[in-house]
Amino acid sequence: MREIVTFDAYGTLVDFQLGPTTLKVLADRLDLDGLDVDEFLDDFRVIRFQAVLEPYRPYHEVLHSSLEMAMRLHGLEYRASDGDALVEAVPTFGPFPEVQDALRALKTRYEIAIISNTDDELIARNIANIGVEFDHVITAQQAKAYKPDRETFEHAYRTIGVDPSQVIHTAQGWEYDLIPTRDLGLRRRVWINRYGRLGSTAYQPYDELPDLSGLPALLGC
């Protein structure tokens, strides 16, 4: 029987430096008295999540519109070039330090795949930065849906040609991945809890690791 490990990309494999990059892009406007930078970045994160719950549009558009909304919410001047700079930065993000070795070990036994909320053009360079060949790369652009919509996952399984019972899904995204995959009949789920968040017994069973370094041993490699 085929065995496949699917991965979320940003935050799981790729060090998704969107917050620090946003601060660099907006450096000339973030010195306003009274601006709570942490609150601004949190609002930007929440607005992005809300945006992917709406009818599908390309991820680069989601970044533009979400950034504009967050900036206007906090009284900051938005320029179209701000969104452009953020989109251009995403493909430059590279992997977490342990990712390459973990993926190479997993490939000795499993097919490996990405299921990511992104555009094909953006993820291509991130994968090149990882430097490990994936058997399958599924994006929101291909599915015309974003996680947590279960259609994103179901599209991936149809495209790969596997039953969910053959799939081990590995991700750090709680809202995007762990919650929606609970009832999909997956063989196994692994939460990469890089940020020390609290899980929930309501969404068990899942394994929990702080990063990918322990994943090969967990999965018998």
Image (tube, rainbow, N blue to C red):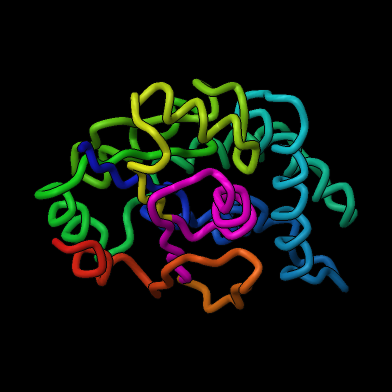
- Looking at the image, which residue is at 30% across and 30% down? 136
Q: Residue furthest left?
A: 108
Residue 155 on the magenta span: no
**The C terminus sits in image quarter:** bottom left
- Looking at the image, which residue is at 61% across and 48% down? 180
Please state if 38 lies on the left or on the right of 111 as rendered: right
For the record, the magenta segment spans 171-193
Q: Eyeballing the image, is 3 above or below 193?
A: above
Q: Residue 30: x and y, percent?
A: 74, 62
Q: Residue 49: x and y, percent?
A: 71, 47
Please state if 97 lies on the left or on the right of 54 as rendered: left
**The N terminus sits in image quarter:** top left
Between 33 and 47, the one nearer to me in the picture: 47
Residue 178 on the magenta span: yes
Please state if 205 lies on the left or on the right of 176 as rendered: left
Between 210 and 97, the one nearer to me in the picture: 210
Please state if 135 lies on the left or on the right of 47 as rendered: left
- Looking at the image, which residue is at 62% across and 28% down? 145
- Looking at the image, which residue is at 61% across and 36% down? 150
Q: Eyeballing the image, is 217 above or below 58?
A: below
Tally of numbered discs = 0
Q: Residue 58: x and y, percent?
A: 61, 25
